[in-house]
Image (cartoon, rainbow, N blue to C red):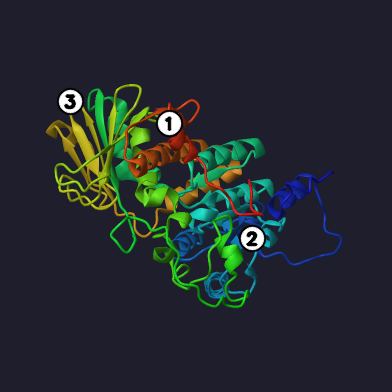
Amino acid sequence: MRLNNATMTRRRFLAAAARAGAVLAVPAFVPASALGKDGGVAASERITLGGIGLNGRGTYVLKALLTLPDTVFVAVCDVRADRRKAVKELVDAKYGNQDCGTYRDLRELLARRDIDAVLIATGDRWHTLASIMAAKAGKDVYCEKPCSMSIGESRILAETMRRYGRVFQVGTQRRTIDSFKFAADLARSGKLGKLQTLHASLAFYGGGPNGEHVRHDWLPAEPEPPRETLDWDLWLGPAPWRPYNRAYSAGTMGWLSHFDFNAGGGWLNWASHTVDLCQWANQADGTTPIEFEPVGPERGYAAKQVVQARYANGVKLVMRPCDDKDWLPLGSCQVRFEGEEGWVETGDSNEVAVYPETLRTERTVFDKVGTFPVSHLRNFVDCVKSRAQPATNADVARSSHVASHAAAIAWMLDRRLTFDPATESFLGDDEANRMRTRAMREPWQM
């Protein structure tokens, strides 16, 4: 039996050995749980995972992941020693051992042949490159959103996953939450009549000293900590170099205010969720709107916080702040789908508002999801086993992220832009086209 070292993992080796009738030369005690008895999952059916950059959000996802009986988490990589230690303690306490490996450099974790898939929850700047490095190392990928810093990264990410045959799921988990699925199904089924307008909520975090959404200045330089405590060069990764300041790495809100470290000037914080849901409702996976136009102060909107877009089928997409007075009190991450005969609106409360009243014969109240919808991870793990495409795969993410990046560029340039979904480029606007990509700091490249 010939083994391909580039793709062979511990789980696949065990399965192959079983099929080949491999026999141990000497007697050995094998726990019943390893054979799938006593309610356990056989070792050959478990997905072995590692994690990269698991701080706040990443820890939430990891805790959900650890509830899945057919997964085992074996290693964490983080440029910060305190995060490596915290994750190791969490994982070791779960399994009752000291086996969770720790790494400062993601390349060392990705070199482990026993790891089937990785959970990536770094800052935005690392998402695309870390995912591509994982795919080239033969790993499947679950990556937190937004999964790209630019239109160009969105394209390269999807093409890489296809070329290497990897399973990829982005953490836009609302496609697997029942209330959002219900709203999208109403729009897609025609029960609202012909779709007219889709609404996606936006949220901007952080900001600059003068009230701008993001800042482009540098914080004052401070002495760098020892590399083993915090590897500043690896923390920056492909982002432009700047001197160390502890505020950058002090959690998500530390770096999110700075343009060099976030996606779309903060635009994709929520747009990667809500625009994705609008794309889904409009059956627009694989394409994007063809026009993007910023809208000035009106109906209580702040200047340039709204972009209106139009699809080739005539449907309008309105991206507006989450605190706009016209949203219903249905929780965060709101979306609204309007057709000629009715509308539906929902958010993270898991409640759904509909019109006309006849639609209330359908289910409109759903169970609370909790901290994280395990169903999204379940979908990913099942697809790792079956090699099917998960709910928010790389091609789905490509379309919704490209649409969101295009809207952000129109917002930053403060002018109407025409877009070609086929070439993912702006028509007749060189400045906008230059903003489709971002330079990457050496030696990091895709």
Q: Which residue position holds label 3?
A: 341
Residue 50 figure quarter: bottom right
Q: Position of residue 234 (x, y in %)?
A: 60, 63
The vertical placement of 318 against 143, above or below, is above
Residue at screen point 53% across, 39% down: 152
Q: Is residue 405 visible?
A: yes
At label 2, counting other C-alpha atoms closer than 10 Å, the crowd grade (few under 14, some 14-19, many 20 or more) is many
Which residue matches tag 2? Answer: 106
Q: Which residue is mark 1?
A: 429
Asked if residue 428 lies left or right of residue 357, the reply is: right
Q: Is residue 139 above or below residue 396?
A: below
Q: Amino acid at mark 3?
A: Glu
Q: Can residue 38 be seen by looking at this rendering? A: no
Q: Amino acid at mark 2?
A: Leu
Kindly indicate the quadrant of the structure image that contains residue 32: bottom right
Asked if marks 3 and 1 touch (Cβ < 8 Å), the reply is: no
Please state the total of marks drawn on the protein image: 3
Inter-mark Cα distance, 3 to 2: 52 Å
Q: Which mark is residue 148?
A: none
What is the quadrant of the C terminus in the image?
top right
- Which callout, 2 or 1, points to the residue nearer the camera? 1
Q: How dense is the environment of label 1, judged by Cα within 10 Å: few (below 14), some, or many (20 and up)? A: few
- Label 3: element kind: loop
Badge 2 element: helix
- Labelled pair 3, 2 in contact (Cβ < 8 Å): no
x, y percent for residue 255: 44, 63
Residue 176: x and y, percent? 40, 44
Residues at marks 2 and 1, CA–CA distance in whole angstroms: 38 Å
